[in-house]
Amino acid sequence: MPHAPRNRISNAIDSLITHLVPSNPHDDEQTAQERHDACFELVRAIFERPNSPSISADVNHASDLIKRKLIHSNPSQALRFSNLYTRLLSLPVLNQKWAILYLLYQLSDSPNPNEPPPLPRQPAAPHGLTSREPSFRDRELQAQILREQEENQVEAENYQGPVPAEPSFREPASREPNFRESVTQRAAGRATGRSTAIAESKTSTPAPPLVSEEEAVNNVFAPGGLKKLPTERPRRNTNAEEARSQPGAVDGSTKKSTRDVSIKSNLLADNSLEFEPSEMGLLRDLPFTLQGLSSTTLPFTRDTVLKLPPTLPVPIVSLLHTLAEPSLLYRGLANFVKSQAKGLLGQSLRAAINNELRSYLTLVATLEAQIRRALSSLDEAAPRGGIGKAGVTLKRCVVWTREATMGLRLMSLISEESYSKQGGQLISLIHGFSTSHGDPVVAAFAERLLADVTRPFYDILRRWIYDGELSDPHLEFFVREQNPNNEKQNESKAKGQASVWNSKYEVVDAMVPSIMTPDFAQKVFLIGKSLNFIRHSCGDSQWVDAYSKTSSKELKYGDTATLEKWIDDAYKTTMQRLMTLMNTRFRLFDHLQALKNYILLGQGDFIALLMESLAANLDRPAGAQYRHTLTAQLEHAIRGSNAQYDSDEVLRRLDARMLQLSHGDIGWDCFTLEYKIDAPVDVVVTEWGNRQYLKVFNFLWRIKRVEFALASTWRKCMTGARGVLQSNDETVLQTWKSTRGTLAEMIHFVGQLQYYILFEVIESSWGELQKNIRKEDCTLDDLITAHTKYLTSITHKGLLGARRRQHHDAQKEAASLGRDASEVEDRNSYMVQLSLLLRNMLDYRDSVDGLYSWSVSDFTRRQEVDTVSLLRKHRPNSGDMESSVGPDDPFFGSAGGVGGNNNIKSEFPALQERLKQLGVSFRQRLQILLGDLAYQPDVDMRFLGVSMNFNDVYQPVRRKSGKAGAGGSAVSAVGGEKQQQQQQQQQQGGNVGSVNVSFSASRA
């Protein structure tokens, strides 16, 4: 045998002997060493025998031995053994089944003190279990062990010295691990030193005193087992005397020697004290106590109080304290099960706890049967009635009920917490024990509870994701119908953002159970909401019913992966069906395209023809506008443009109407186009969305009107420059030159603003919208979000929603006015600035028309003067004729008369001053706007300022912080109006040409 394995075997044998063989406290080291060596020799002799098997490795043979023994001793258990044997053979993991059965067969013999010590079996025949006669060496080793036991008992009787408090049952620390060198050396030492050690032990060692009862009990129940022989054992003394009186039994004589068998139950019985009520009485009443019922010895004074007898010793009281815990927990849980539940999950929790209590009562019934069987076999003459040999004690009852007590604790904690929780919160509570508790027993118990508690939850979930119906009478599901009186709901309705899609159901985050993630819960919410929307809003209930019949599955707790797969499949199917309906049946995308073409002025030829046909009619007051006239002009614009090729479904929704009238409004101020949206498309284009479309249309319509007016005036001026606008007066020519330059600046501004809004804002936002809604996994929520972002981007970048005012300034003004901050008009917003600029340009157009009329009148006057002069040249007696011209002559006032010429000349300075003021005001406002745009965080808005001032004609002005006037005339960095006029005159020659070029480029 190699050196290392030999050392390991030796160390293992030493540890086994030290743990199993009791030590005598008064033995010296040499005697203890000899006893240890003898045991070691015996074990090594057994290990080193020849390898011939002592029994046949036949599993059937071992099974027959056990079955024959059961038939003779306990026939009722033979059938049960056959069933267990069949199950054992079916286990593929166990390879040495015959060894297991033979071990059980050997262990079946219960120890009997009257039997002689068992002799080691010798190798048997190949097919038999009969052992050979023990050899002389075996008999000598057994006799040696028996003599040492007898000597130890005699020495224990005569011992008078102190008893160690806790004797050591291991080898001294000074001994080295592999101190066994050879078997022959130990045999020689044993032969020479045994007699001397025994003699010294008998003469010099006094008998030990009687050990106290408490110490005896502690020694019996020590963690490592019984470490030494009891100090006083009358029965063992009798057995020792019988063993000494029969010395020849070891030598093979016919007399039998008794074996010293000491088990804990016997030792405890011999050292026990009597107390009332007895342990038998406590065991008799224990099943009633465990069921929460009062008994004679253990009465319940209240639901939470169990009264213990005051005469019991402390160890018994400690055991009863442990047994009282499941009793009190059972009473509390029984009352909880009978209490009224709040909802379906509360009822399922009580049902699950009730099932566990039934299992607990089954355990109590089994324990009661064991107690009755044990009490019926007691021996009244034995100490403590022989309760130790009966197999049932209070301590064993504690062990048997330990796992059940842990389950009752968990259920009691859950029941207490359930009063303040419901629905998903209750599931999260139990699931927390399953995932966050370190004890696997508690985790498994919580998993078992969840399987029963979650059944109503999964029933509601199944109805929601397969039928689109919310069957939750007790509000336990995390999806809930919105309260119509909710403040948030009322706020959404006031803003026009409420719809059937987002105002009917909501997710309650506090009710989402921890068994599902927030993303998973959101998917479940969308599935049910989509099915409900398809059924009730889209009118496609037949598809929902067919889908429910073909796809509905039973949902239960445990298989999370399968549940997630089913939810994903239902999510994809539902979303695909909903988007198909919105695109094909309700033509959502066509409506969005129509809104862009007609409301956002994307259909250019239609808008140009509509404005041209309505121009004369809209110049009249708003009260003079008639609906049939507007409708007729709208129809004319549709038939005369490419709009005629759109579908009737789109064109019938387009309508022209007048907004709310105000005093002094004309048709241009009140006219608007409207595109009617009905359900279910209104969940995307909500009331708020319609307002945003109307807001953008009105703004673009005003820009188009200014562009149309300026273009008409520009064409008239360019045509008249070659005719009626020609003059010999340098002042008039210079005025017309500056006027055309300012008019070109305004046209350039309007062209750049219109290009920016239509192309840089609307077209880019439309492309982003198309990109988002054309995705394969796009849902209705994604489409609504993308459309809202589209409108927000248009209104913000289109200078309709961007504001310069700080939030705290708006709040201060709102507080002073007693209104909401959002309702307070921001006088510094871009919308107000652009409105003032557009109004300024219209006023300038009116002044240019006035100058054009004066120029025509002046041209007519000059033509008349030339005609009169020509007539005078061809008439004779012109001097008489001059003197004869009077007030009655038709050429008196117009042919160079003093009165007519003065009237015409008096209008020109006023017109000139008016044009100059409007031009300066336009530049000032434009410079302020450019200064605001230069500091915008948005790149596109900064680009608008660059395109309007690409050649640095204007000097952008950054306004200082402070309140501006209603007209926006607060300019802080301007040197004055005269300085601007000087700069304008210096740049007049080059600026006009550059602006004309830019205007021509923008028009192209």
Image (cartoon, helix red, strand yellow):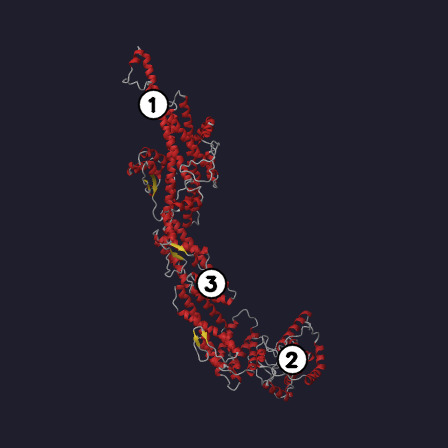
Q: State the image coordinates of residue 864 (x, y, percent, origin top left).
A: 33, 19
Nearer the viewer's eye, disc 2 or disc 3? 2
Count neighbours of disc 2 (C-alpha within 10 A) and say few if under 14, some if 14 to 19, many if 20 or more: some
- What residue did someone put label 2 on? 25
The answer to whether 464 is drawn above or below residue 863 in the figure is below
Furthest residue in direction bottom, as rendered: 245
Question: With 494 as the anchor, is 193 left or right in this view?
Answer: right
At x 48%, y 63%, the residue is 432
- Please name which of the two marks, 1 or 2, marks the residue nearer to the observer: 1
Q: Give the Cα separation between the discs numbered 2 and 3.
A: 56 Å
Residue in the picture at 54% in, 69% down: 92
Closer to us: 705 or 20: 705
- Image quarter where the C terminus lies is top left
* Mark 3: amino acid: His
Residue 569 visible here: no
- The location of residue 325, given as percent across then percent down, is 48, 73
Q: Which mark is residue 430?
A: none
Secondary structure beneath label 1: helix
Q: Does the CB distance between marks 3 and 1 fall below 8 Å?
A: no
Question: How far apart are labels 1 and 2 at the CA level?
Answer: 147 Å
Residue 903's label in the rendered image is: 1
The answer to which image quadrant residue 544 occupies is bottom left
Q: Nearer the viewer, mark 3 or mark 1?
A: 1
Per the image, label 3 sits on a secondary structure element best described as helix
Mark sitting on residue 431: 3
| Image quadrant in which the N terminus is located | bottom right
Q: Position of residue 558 (x, y in %)?
A: 46, 62
Q: Callout 1: few (<14), some (14-19), or many (20+) C-alpha neighbours within 10 Å?
A: few
For marks 3 and 1 on the same chain, the one whose residue lies earlier in the sequence? 3
Amino acid type, label 1: Asn
